[in-house]
Image (spheres, grey):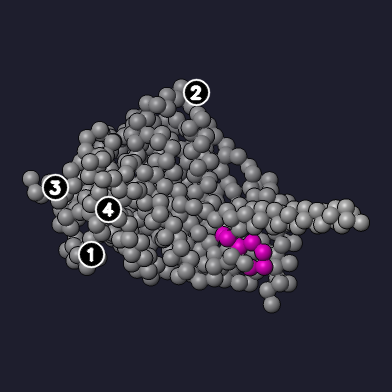
Amino acid sequence: MCACRTGDTSRRNLAAAVLLCAGVLSGYALGGCAPSPRAYEASPLPHGMRIAILPLANYTANREAPDKIAPMLLSELAQRGGLHIVDPGAVEAVLAREPWLLYDRIPPDLVERFGAELGVDALLVGSVLGFGFRQSEGERIPHVSIALRLVRTADGTVLWSAAHSRDGADREWLFGLGRVESLEQLLARSIAEIALAFPATTTDAESQVPDDGKRQPLRAERGAR
Amino acid sequence: MRSPSNIERCAKRAVLAVLGFGLGCAAPAQFVHPDADLPFYETVGIVPFESVNADRLAGVKVSNVFFTELLRTRFAEVKEPGQFQAAMSRVRGGTPTNKPWSSTDLAKLGEEAGVQGIFTGIVRDYEMVRVGRESFPLVSLEVRLLDAATGRVVWSASHTRRGGPTMPFTGWREIHTLGELTTQMCRQLLDSLAQG
């Protein structure tokens, strides 16, 4: 009797374990494959690098998209150590003097002038490729798509570039679990994810940009010389 | 409230997945010139792709994604889009840069921008298509690498893909957005360049 009961218990435990594994695997398979940012990184950034975030070019019908994204981007990047993000008010003041319509296609002379006037080493530019809702089964599901790149003001070298697209149903698996219904919430997540893909900063001793094998001095250092 | 629509959705996904599996798995068609010396192209630029669909901005959107993916391959140094745009404006003047380029203009652009190769492209489809009550992204794209000096096509690839589930009967790796589908397609196209 005892041996029989033990056998039943083992079988029940085995069945429970199999069901648990199947559940976990299904969860991963259905909900664990949300897109992650695709990024190119030339090298780690020098510690203390000064960066200005320019307004994003807007390729969507939603006029407010860049205004919603910029503050979130600023907040995420400011939390990272080793970078100095220039005050958006200063950026606005310089842009008012140098009007330019397409901020993701800035000519090299203007990049250099923005760099000099803002006292920054790099400009973060980019575009909003998608921002809104799509229809699915009669429901509105939010989506966001962004492309960003970090351009060195001294010579126009691309130090980092990334594209990221997210949809509210990316992490949905069963019965609507995992779905993001709010566009603002999805945007916040997307910005946090793309900021995570931003290059790390080196310590001063390690600071170098390997493109040409020569370290580029920071603008603050050039000014001090 | 939501359960019946989810059951319907699962059943529809299964049918769509089976029907769309062929389109979702199709590989890009590609051409590499037999005399092409790909390592010769050390610096390249991207002309914003031409859009021949309802979304007139699709070309710029796709070329922005293509830029990041091209950098990721480390195939060549890629001119910063602003720098390349400035060179195009100097060569073209007021003519829109996404209109076809003559070999003479391409040679001038190559010299002006300091590039050996120039990527051009056409976005034929870039839209969300409705299938029943679901909507999936559909992108059709053709990209070419031209030799700047001669205008000769060195490499070209084209691809059409629709989003939705990539595995029948599941939502596994389902692609919902035009941006994500574009990213995956650019990666697939450029894989063929790396292999070429």
Give above or below for A181 relative to B61: below
Residue stretch in magenta:
A170-176
Mark 3 or mark 1: which comes first in sequence?
1
Mark 3 or mark 4: which comes first in sequence?
4
Q: Does B66 sit left or right of A214 as displayed?
A: right
Q: Does A73 sit left or right of A140 as displayed?
A: left
**Residue in view at x 60 percent, y 72 percent:** A139
Q: Chain of mark 4?
A: A
Can residue A38 be seen at all in this image of the molecule?
A: yes
Q: For the N terminus of chain B, give its image quadrant.
A: bottom right
Identify the residue under disc 3. Answer: A221
Q: Chain of mark 1?
A: A
Residue A155, horizontal then vertical, whole percent: 22, 43
The answer to whether mark 3 and mark 2 are in CB contact below 8 A is no
As measured in the structure, the alpha-carbon distance from the residue carrying label 1 to the one carrying label 4 is 16 Å
Identify the residue under disc 2. Answer: B34
Residue B101, horizontal then vertical, whole percent: 37, 40
The answer to whether mark 3 and mark 1 are in CB contact below 8 A is no
Disc number lying in front (3 or 1): 3
